[in-house]
Image (cartoon, rainbow, N blue to C red):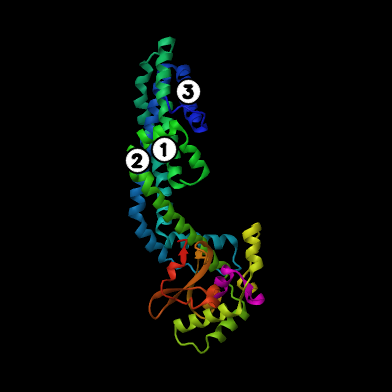
Amino acid sequence: MSWLDGNFVTIALLALVAVSLLQGMRRGAKGSAKQLFLFLSGALLTLVAMGAAAWCASAASPAVQRWLAARNWEMPAADASTWRQLGYTAFSGVRDLPLLRFAVLFLIAYLLLRYVLGTVSSLLIRVGAAPFVLVPGGGPVSRTVGGLIGAALGGGRAILVTAVLFAYCALSPQSAFAQYIEQSGLYREAAAQIIRPAAGDLLTERLPVLAASMQGEMDKLWQKRYDIIDADLPTDIVSAAKEVTSQADGDEAKARALYEWVGTRVAYDDAKAEAYEQRGEWREQSPEDTFRTREGVCIDYARLYAAMARSVGLNVRVVTGQGYNGQGGYGPHAWNEVLLGDRGEWIPLDSTWAKTGDWFNPPRFDDTHIRSA
């Protein structure tokens, strides 16, 4: 009985079994047996629907991607309605991000299959539950049997809750709540004896990898907002970018000229960085603000560079992640990647760090920059 303790998780799991036991006693053997049958049938239906939905999503994903790519939905202007901007962001995200596309297709397929299978199986379940009318419904024996069946049903519910908690601990092992969950003796026992053997490495290894990949895709989707909110290029930025690249020949020369201009003309705003790091205060500023004030932090450098690069026909993106802080650690950072069309190659550059050295596609750039996606 070493698994008994005062941990809230232990108490909650035991309470789930106890409540189900009392409900079973109240319903009697007939009602409890029927409830157990419905519980197991519903669980089986859910598993079948999830498996079929996963297969459908995987099979349909390539065709959906090709169909979306053929739509050629142009990026809305910066002054377009919020709904149009959100619609384009969602459209381009599903088109360009495989895991997000799979998740959307899986959800759609699951809901449809659950509805169809639920409608068809409801009749089968009613037929399957028919024999329970023969089970005695009253008396102490019936209530005792009902309590035992209710306890079994509560155990099944407790196992489901334990599986959810186990998945949470696998995804966030360092969180305070995960550490508290692990202190529950009953949880540890159920996880070790039931969940871990049943799931194998699905929850402990594959789920965290999948979640990390999904988070990376959501980060990419979040970064796409800069493509929209910075799409309206002010004339002063366009004129400056054209002047800076007037003598440049080719994409790489244009990209480097803009890198050197932004990196030397904009000063790092230490006060803005300090306000965010110490007090959580954030002042959003547009590329036009950065161009006008000649001050900003890394994201402002990156957004201004992207705006100027787009104005001269370069394909560029804003990248966020972690940058080396020079003290053995990393902190939030932003930089750019630009496509050299003549070579078909994306190269990184960091105009924020331009005053400290040459950060235009240097060797081992990834040693000091860790992108979120």
Q: Is residue 327 magenta?
A: no
Q: Are marks 2 and 3 in contact (CB under 8 Å)?
A: no
Tag of residue 88: none
Region of the chain picked out in magenta, as a range: 290-305
Quadrant in which residue 78 is drawn:
bottom right
Query: Label 2: which residue?
Result: 199
- How far across and how far down the image is residue 329, in percent? 50, 61
In this view, 69 is above or below 264: above
Query: Label 1: which residue?
Result: 163
* Mark 2 vs mark 1, CA separation in Å: 9 Å
Q: Nearer the viewer, residue 7 or 124?
A: 7
* Mark 1 vs mark 3, CA separation in Å: 19 Å
Instruction: Point out the image quarter for the N terminus.
Output: top left
Q: Are marks 2 and 1 in contact (CB under 8 Å)?
A: yes
Q: Residue at the location (49% across, 81% down)?
A: 256
* Mark 2 vs mark 3, CA separation in Å: 26 Å
Instruction: Point out the image quarter for the C terminus.
Output: bottom left
Q: Is residue 303 magenta?
A: yes
Tag of residue 18: 3
